[in-house]
Image: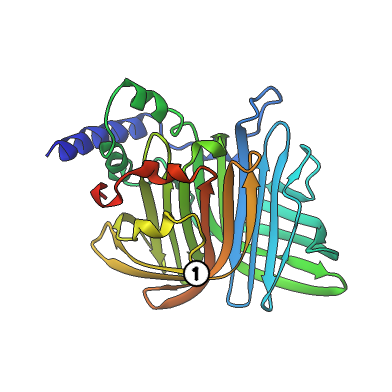
Amino acid sequence: MFFKLKKKIISKSIEKRIKQHPFDFQYAENFTLKDEADSLMNNSYYFSAHDEKMSVFARLGKRTDMDETWFTVYFDGKIHTLREEFFESGESPLHVEKNGDDWDLSFQGIVNEKDKLLFQAKFRPQRSPIDFTTDMPAERMAVGIANERWNRTFFENLKNISGQCHYEQEGVLEGRMTLNEESLSFSLPCVRDHSFGKRDWNDMNNHLWLMAVSLSCQINYSLVSYPALSVLEVGHCRNGNDMHYMSRADLNLETVNQGTVPSGLKFKMILDDGRVIDVDAKVLTGVTYHFQDGSYILHENVAEFCIDGNVCRGILEIGFNKDHSRYFNQRDLKSIKR
């Protein structure tokens, strides 16, 4: 009974705040880091594009002192990936630039050990952006908060989570790449993800992100654990032009509690219209990334999905703090209400 009351109080508070502070898409699109910004401030651009033959993911995480950089192409069963993870600010071989409503993405450098890769592409948006604060049902955050013990320290720590702006947008990534002497043109369904604000990787306990995209459907399921918030889950699903948000999911949390990459995951996602979506993901290949001197390890995996019978590709991303005792704050997972 107390949980329901807490959830109701927080839901109303979140809904009020959203009305007072709606998502400002134009501000977010043009955000840049100030030279004097703290090193924990982050401005991250991520692209994930897939069809049945090819997958591309790229991330440029701008900070005042470095560029966190990912670039990977998976094609014909072989992965081609940039081995270096960090570059001095402005020195990354990956470039992301806004061009009107589009985004230009380019890479020139060495992948694997000695393969030369030239990549030039343009992201063209095709759907409205989805903001993870203002578009998600308020109940999702409220459930996470209601699961915690309330006191002054808790609400102070909660501020570390609320400082990020995070949104995504579907579109098409079109371009051409040349690997050594072989060239290939491509046009791939793509999700562009942009986040900015304070990001301290060591403030995360563990997380899971599933995202699949195709012309006919797209799905997103995000789960994260912080010291202040043991479990936070959000998600959405597009079927054709029909977009709905997740009410809850029945993923077995133990699968994200082992410190290892699962070979696959199966669960059901219940949407806000009452529909139940079957989600089945199988890992194909992946790359491991290391943040803040190994404080947080992130595994970015290309995966094959079956979404209610629709087969497509996407990402199974999973990450863990180096301190294994922090996963889900050592909570009894069966006691967490979802």
Tell me what residue is drawn at x 45 percent, y 37 percent.
23
Lateral position of residue 123 relative to residue 318, left or right? right
- The residue that mark 1 highlights is 263
Q: Residue at x 61, y 56 (%)?
A: 47
Give coordinates of residue 38: x percent, y percent: 63, 25
Q: Nearer the viewer, residue 127 or 32?
A: 32
> Regarding mark 1 in the picture, which secondary structure is present there?
loop
In the foreground, 288 or 223: 288
Query: Horizontal placement of 2 versus 148: left or right?
Result: left
Above or below, comparing residue 212 to residue 83 in the picture: below
Residue 12: x %, y % from top left: 24, 34
- Tell me if residue 317 can be seen: yes
Of residue 215 and residue 73, the one placed in the foreground of this image is 73
Viewer can see residue 125:
no
- Residue 28 x, y percent position in the rendering: 55, 38
Q: Residue at x 58, y 73 (%)?
A: 51
Q: Nearer the viewer, residue 297 or 105?
A: 297
Query: Where is residue 181, by image quadrant?
Result: bottom right
The amino acid at mark 1 is Ser
Location of residue 50 by image quarter: bottom right
Furthest residue toward left: 1
